[in-house]
Image (tube, rainbow, N blue to C red):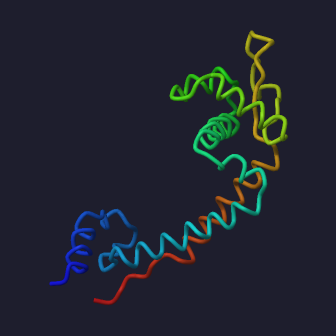
Amino acid sequence: MSDQKLRKQRINSKLRFHKLPAKLDMLDSKLLGSTISNFIHFVFLERSKSVPLNWVFANIKRTKIFLQIFHANQTGKEIYKEEIAKHLSEYSYKTIAKIVDDGIVKEYFVLLPPDGVAGNDAKVKNIRPSEELITDFLNLSIDIISYIDKHKPKKLPK
């Protein structure tokens, strides 16, 4: 058996195909890899259409900070730099503050009163994603779901 076939068999034996919907048991690493590569290209192309999304997804630090802010917004919780720093302890407060401040200057993040009862510290600023950023992120997510639904691999005949 060729080295390439043995390599493919080793890779396939380690993949968790059983977790895929519709029991795509005849799928292999080559088809799966091609499908995923096309999908990731699609996501990057769609993301590039939005300046705010390009900014928040430019690096992992911004992405993690954005996701903290987005999640707090969706759940109606107050979020501020110190709270983000607690959840992302791998980054310094200074790094987080700089990214948040840059996002505010660019108007990708906005300071709004909390949805519920305000905290006791008047200096604390509740951070929210801008309406444009929320809309772009949700539309990207809808596009991703739609893409997956339209391009999901079909079960191969046995």
Quadrant location of the N terminus in the rendered image: bottom left
In screen coordinates, is 135 left or right of 67?
right
In screen coordinates, is 140 left or right of 16?
right
Q: Where 62 falls versus 126 (above or below)?
A: below
Q: Quadrant of residue 124?
A: top right
Q: Nearer the viewer, residue 7 or 33?
A: 7
Q: Where 25 falls versus 90 (above or below)?
A: below
Quadrant location of the C terminus in the rendered image: bottom left
Where residue 102 appears, x then y in whole percent? 78, 35
- Residue pushed farthest front? 3
- Residue pushed farthest top? 120
Q: Quadrant of residue 118?
A: top right
Q: Nearer the viewer, residue 97 or 79?
A: 97
Q: Please give the name of the residue rendered at 64% of the width and 28% of the height, measured from the top-left corner.
A: 95
Where residue 53 appears, x then y in whole percent? 72, 52
Q: Nearer the viewer, residue 66 or 44?
A: 44
Where residue 34 appears, x then y in whole percent? 46, 76
